[in-house]
Amino acid sequence: MVIVMERNAKEEEIEAVIEKLTSNGFDIHRSTGVERTILGAVGAHVVDTRDYELMPGVREVHRVTSPYKLAARAFCPEGTVIEVNGVRIGSEEVAIMAGACTIKDYAECDAIARRLRKQGVRIIRGGAFKPRTSPYSFQGHGEAGLKALRQAADENGMAIISEVLEPHQIPLAEKYIDIVQIGARNMQNYGLLRELGQLKKPVLLKRGMSATVQDLLLAAEYIMSEGSHQVMLCERGIRTFETHTRNTMDISAIPVIHKLSHLPIIADPSHAIGIRDKVPPLARAAVAAGADGLLMEVHTDPEQALCDGAQTLYMEQFEKLMKELREIARAVGRVVPEAETVTA
Amino acid sequence: MVIVMERNAKEEEIEAVIEKLTSNGFDIHRSTGVERTILGAVGAHVVDTRDYELMPGVREVHRVTSPYKLAARAFCPEGTVIEVNGVRIGSEEVAIMAGACTIKDYAECDAIARRLRKQGVRIIRGGAFKPRTSPYSFQGHGEAGLKALRQAADENGMAIISEVLEPHQIPLAEKYIDIVQIGARNMQNYGLLRELGQLKKPVLLKRGMSATVQDLLLAAEYIMSEGSHQVMLCERGIRTFETHTRNTMDISAIPVIHKLSHLPIIADPSHAIGIRDKVPPLARAAVAAGADGLLMEVHTDPEQALCDGAQTLYMEQFEKLMKELREIARAVGRVVPEAETVTA
Amino acid sequence: MVIVMERNAKEEEIEAVIEKLTSNGFDIHRSTGVERTILGAVGAHVVDTRDYELMPGVREVHRVTSPYKLAARAFCPEGTVIEVNGVRIGSEEVAIMAGACTIKDYAECDAIARRLRKQGVRIIRGGAFKPRTSPYSFQGHGEAGLKALRQAADENGMAIISEVLEPHQIPLAEKYIDIVQIGARNMQNYGLLRELGQLKKPVLLKRGMSATVQDLLLAAEYIMSEGSHQVMLCERGIRTFETHTRNTMDISAIPVIHKLSHLPIIADPSHAIGIRDKVPPLARAAVAAGADGLLMEVHTDPEQALCDGAQTLYMEQFEKLMKELREIARAVGRVVPEAETVTA
Amino acid sequence: MVIVMERNAKEEEIEAVIEKLTSNGFDIHRSTGVERTILGAVGAHVVDTRDYELMPGVREVHRVTSPYKLAARAFCPEGTVIEVNGVRIGSEEVAIMAGACTIKDYAECDAIARRLRKQGVRIIRGGAFKPRTSPYSFQGHGEAGLKALRQAADENGMAIISEVLEPHQIPLAEKYIDIVQIGARNMQNYGLLRELGQLKKPVLLKRGMSATVQDLLLAAEYIMSEGSHQVMLCERGIRTFETHTRNTMDISAIPVIHKLSHLPIIADPSHAIGIRDKVPPLARAAVAAGADGLLMEVHTDPEQALCDGAQTLYMEQFEKLMKELREIARAVGRVVPEAETVTA
């Protein structure tokens, strides 16, 4: 912690700050300049910096130790790689996770899985529990949905990513889901984070709409502090004043997080932009910016999707996009899985 | 729903939209102007407007029915009044709820309650479960804390407002708490909202940091749709680009919500500004703007507070503030409770 | 400047930073802690902190000297008072400036001035040059408008506040205007600010829609560095994600600016909220929060106003509001001018 | 304009709205539904929608005609192409504009131009007038700078893009500059925009920090309404709550603007992110998202740059980036200029 005193701070004010620091267990380094005095305080204790800001003669207080430890790059400088169904998330491979927003039934899941598999996709998404802004909107098929998705995934050799909203759904996650998704609205639902930290399954943690990158890393810290280090982060757009898009995708978060943390960072262009025709440009941008993966809504028949059809890609759009992504990935030294070649 | 067609929309495009609307059960009113065609669609169905935005020839789609019903002003034009311990929240009385951020022990609760009571305060706040951004911060004393606060409240004739973070804490809320507080981070924790809606206790619902007023009203709708109509809303600051303050208190939300909804609106200046010396100006502003109540952190010894001491008022500041608030309330036709007069 | 090194920074990296600091003329204080090294650099030079952030081994750089000097509270601890037509802006008196958004003609100006004067208002507003978002909107009557307003002001014993958009309008300002207003869109039009700084007339500087408080103080510094110290600041709402209001009035800016700067701070509730029925609550809130003045749109016939009629108060609303403001001002130790008593 | 009446609006309220619309020259289409009445108003007049919002019985008013005409996609559906020095901005070619932030002298300009030219770059940037947040920062070399840049550009066969801050600098722009840049702070400096609209030189208009896409298009309309249609837009980051980056680059603005407008859209990753090491990921993302060009700060010796050295790329970084951009452009059906092959 660095405490900058006011230009005209009195000696007794400076000493009062030093005394408080000492009593809180800090080592102090005092720099007395011509203009002002600066106090460097070194110690392991977490304090509320405002307690010092309010002391007479204090101008500013800066915290200098990062409040997250396990999520910090320094904890694992080479970067975390999470392996799911043969996909090494965080490696040079760009992980592609795709599928319907909300699970309808087995037939739909199977049709989607089949087509995705041909594009080399090995992780399918699909929601069984939906957090809806309105209490009158459809809230998901629950366990029946998960069962259908599991069957389709197994038959097509795919892993599942799906969202969990409440602690009581965790046993279902344990049974059916390979990567547990935490949605933006739950990013700071700490009870849920802690319980998932004990589950020891990979977690994809979405950034909250008003969460800073630091907030996101602190939320990851909640999961990791319970022992589970298989956390991937997800940028899905933040809330700004712009109204032409549902959210504003913070593309810079990708290189920023790569610098600050060792955790893989995935982009969700579907939720970031909220409208189908602009998903491909954002998906391409994310890979070009260095994202470790993409989470996208794709459907064989978006008009019949139970939810968010408007932001769901047609399969043909997705196939075209995958082609572009393969080239872009190559340009930045990464790999997007190849489409399966038909063997007669 | 109003659908505005592009200037050069073709007749078959217009007809395709009309057909989709009809098949979705809407009555259509078509206005063919010189410049463009406008379709008014009337019906009870909730649809995703983006499904129409994506149709060829469509320029814009506007939803014209409010997505919330029970929380809308029209549902209770005269305004909801919630009575707790003789305080009529939503009436001409400005409800004052005050106390420590986090409960330490009985002695502290009692000391605070005693002083508050003298100022006419009849609702005491205190947290037993704390949602902390860092997993390494103190998380509250749980039931032991609630027990201590209950005892102090009972002895001083006060009601309790306290936060609940997770569904499994609801039985404790039922036992100890008079007004259940939902924090900003949980505003869209829909499972929790639904369960609280069944509890039939007054709820204070804080606005999320990135929630619009409409999001807040929809979250209230979640609680109300379970049958509990005793909901009060709370403005506690939103996230903006300004960094001199912890959050930006949206003072306009007070008159805006009064127009849109019948629910009482409370202001929390302590969390909005995050630093003690600027709490009184914001508290005064909120009452001047028409707030139905204030939620504030006050302590007999803020330096010894377990949490958020820096934004907690000294009792002397609070007493001075109450005096000012009484005059301001009078200026706007409201009443802040009088201090008890000492009878010898 | 405080430079925090990475935990594992090498000695040669630390020395490279010290060398660069020294060559830039800084005195250095080095604190070598167990965890990390902190360098305090004291000197008068303005540097780009990013130049240090990019050096190997550097974790963070904090600027500790305020980038504004003349606008800082320390420059004039007792607070600046600007006297215009007997109104002492920045004193205990709350300055009221009111009138039409845009000047129509003499008759309108006179009718408004007459009514305002009866309420004790001694500064009238009115725009001759209008910055309009659309090039097709009415842009103001220019000099003819100023002439009309001047005549009405003179006959009613009032001073004028009016906006200037471009440097070539300054001679007109010199001739007709008592307080020159800089609009939000021009807050960082530095050429204009510099020229106004040489004019030696009081300036009201509006906060830009995306300007932090620090940006606003730096803009004031531009004017002051030219020699003109009669600057008042104006909070008129910032841009946020909320869409129910035109802007979000940052009520906290009032106490924040009072702490950081000696310049008076005025609130403009009309532009902050943008709709008539919610102007009075915001005006009351601003005075309760300690604003040194209000700038408001008031008209004898808002329906006939040339511009922004929807956010313009009816004279009757204004008179009722003034009554409330007088009481609120009293509650916070301030004074709003009394209405003239009719002498028969 | 579409006016949605309240559910319980009285017939006389509806009629009052119709009367006002008629008197304002609108044709009205009335839709009387079971739930509520909707009025469609068709006409050419620009009105303040708030004037209708305030009428009794009115619930919401939606403007349905776009406030910009010349900047709208419909005005030039095939897209505008602006040709400068053989570069066709807005065509399949991705225009690259690069160079120092601020011009130092001829030697520097020449060194940079020489290296850029080898990469196929034909437009060089360099600032002679700098809009600085602090009045104490260096403000540019003015005409001397432009002269130096012009000489270097001419000798290397390059065109110049450079910023103009004030109307009185326009004659210099006419003499020395090929593309006139309007900075973010001047996006709503309407006087300047109008004068540039008469200059008939290509203009690059940067998006203001708090400008919506619509604000940006309206600012372009100011220039175009004076007769100059050679306008390109520039995304350079908006202001949000995130503090790890200088601004938040709104990558979605690229596809959004392509849909709404025919004007080319350029990205400025240097100012968007503000720190050198993260410029390449953003530059790649912009091209992948479909940007028509890039504006970047590049220097042969960033440490010696007069300004913003920290966000300026080393020439080697730029050359590596160009290689990546060429591949990414190909993936999205675009072309980035090839490097010159050395002919012995």
Image (cartoon, coloured by chain):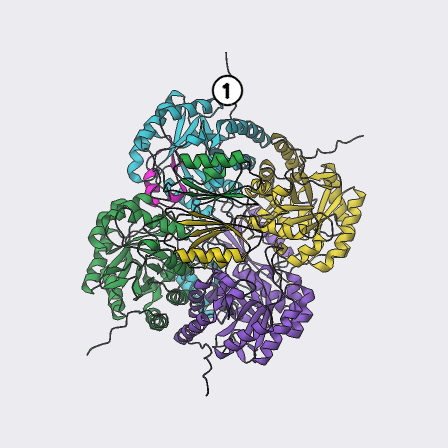
Chain colours: A yellow, B purple, C green, D cyan
Left or right relative to C321: residue C150: left
Identity of the amino acid at label 1? Glu
Q: Using the image, determine if residue D19 lies above or below residue A58.
A: below
Image quadrant in which you'd find residue A341? top right
Q: For mark 1, what is the residue?
A: D340
Chain letter of disc 1 in the image: D
Q: x, y percentage for residue D255?
A: 53, 41
Give A22 or A197, whichever is nearer the viewer: A22
Residue nearest the observer in this picture, C28 or C250: C28
**Residue C243, position as x, y percentages in the image:** 48, 57
The answer to whether residue C173 is above or below residue C344 is above
**Residue D125 or A339: which is nearer the viewer?**
D125
- Magenta span of residues: D178-203
Q: Is residue B194 left or right of residue B82?
A: right
Local secondary structure at mark 1? loop
Residue A266 percent location from the top left of the image: 63, 43
Q: Position of residue A208 (x, y in %)?
A: 59, 52
The answer to which of B70 and C63 lies nearer the viewer is C63
